[in-house]
Amino acid sequence: MKHLKCLFSITSMTLLLAACSNDEPKDYFVKAENETIEHIHGAGYWGEEGTPVIATHGGPFEYRDEGWYKTSRNNHDYMGFQATKDGFYSSGHPEEGSDLKNPLGLVKSADKGESLEKLAFYGVTDFHYLGASYETGTVYTYNEAKNSKIGQGFFYSKNKGKDWTQLELNGMTSSSIGGFDIHPSKDNMIAIYGEEGIFLSENYGKDLSLIPTTAMVTSLTFKKDSMVYSMLENDKVSLHEISLSDKQDTTLTAPSIDNENVPIYLEANPLNDGQMMMVTTKNDVYVSEDKETKWNKVLSNGETK
């Protein structure tokens, strides 16, 4: 909303309008009404309130007060978006007309994207696959193409991209993967998932052990003491939770979706263990407020209300 800024000079006889302007900047977040989101490149919970957020081709959108809000500027195409305790990490491409280099490399923001800290590979690499520990900020990436500093493969950095260590991946038997996630507080713990199941490491990807599943895993998120994952079995999507202590698997309630609209992002709220978010291939977004017993669709086919 624009506000009219006016300066008045008062005398005993007159009220003089000395200066008046209406060029005050817009609020950083504005209501997103009748918008169509065509690409979602990440999801999570950010800020002190743990607000749901999705990263899109046109900047971040956050869900609050039963509606979607978008940024009014700095609408960058964020790839590999990862929310953390003190902001977010991302890669991607700057919005049209920006003076930022393309690609962004690895960047970080502590103010929801109003400003960006350029960390590594600025103007060199676009990381489509990033993971980060919510509490520690340790960043993991799958680098698709060799650059001057790191080669192709999995790497992690504990100092905001200054130094990188390659994951050894002993025990990895799969030739293809669907994605990966990092534990919110134990940055040594990474889960890589795919058709065979979940490969879990507790030593920064040095050694992996397979937790087999009966069908292909399409998305996964860590909670404090468990992993929640979606699985595509017999053309239907199911939702499961695995205890990290005894690996016991429990079936959860999932939205009624099938192989035409599978989950691609699954996120647990680190500030509230009962809240989760699911993003599907058709740009539907579901949120759960009651330990996955009930899901509410808050975005349908990418269309905001």
Image (cartoon, grey):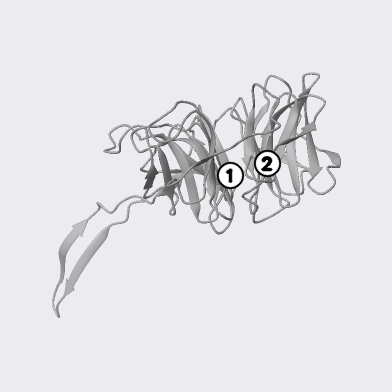
In the rendered image, the residue lying farthest to the bottom is 12
Mark seen at residue 16: none
Tell me if residue 296 can be seen: no
* Vertical arrangement, residue 73 with respect to residue 197, above or below: below
Residue nearest the viewer, comparing 145 with 2: 145
Neighbor class of circle 2 (other Cα within 10 Å; few <14, some 14-19, many 20+) is: many
Cα gap from disc 2 to disc 1, whole angstroms: 10 Å
Q: Which mark is residue 221?
A: 2
Q: Given this view, does label 2 or label 1 mark the residue nearer the observer?
A: 2
Please give the name of the residue rendered at 76% of the width and 51% of the height, measured from the top-left corner. Answer: 225
In the displayed structure, would residue 38 be above or below residue 298?
Answer: above
**Residue at disc 1, secondary structure:** strand
Q: Residues within 10 Å of mark 1 (few under 14, many from 20)?
A: many
Q: Return the residue nearer the eye: 296 or 230.
A: 230
Determine which quarter of the picture holds residue 12.
bottom left
Give the image location of residue 303, x and y in percent: 54, 31
Residue 220 versus residue 262 in the image, above or below: below
Residue annotated with mark 1:
44
Amino acid type of the residue that numbered disc 2 sits on in the rendered structure: Thr
Check disc 2 and report its element: helix, strand or loop. strand
Amino acid found under the numbered disc labelled 1: Gly
Q: Position of residue 85 (x, y in %)?
A: 55, 55
Q: Position of residue 157 (x, y in %)?
A: 50, 46
Residue 164 seen from this side:
yes
Location of the C terminus by quadrant is top right
Residue closest to the eye, 153 or 278: 153
Hey, which quadrant is residue 221 in on the image? top right
Q: Is residue 98 left or right of residue 164?
A: left
Q: Counting residues from the N terminus, which is met first, the one under dot 2 or under dot 1?
A: 1
Residue drawn where x is 69% and y is 24% of the image: 174
Position in image of residue 184 (x %, y %): 63, 50
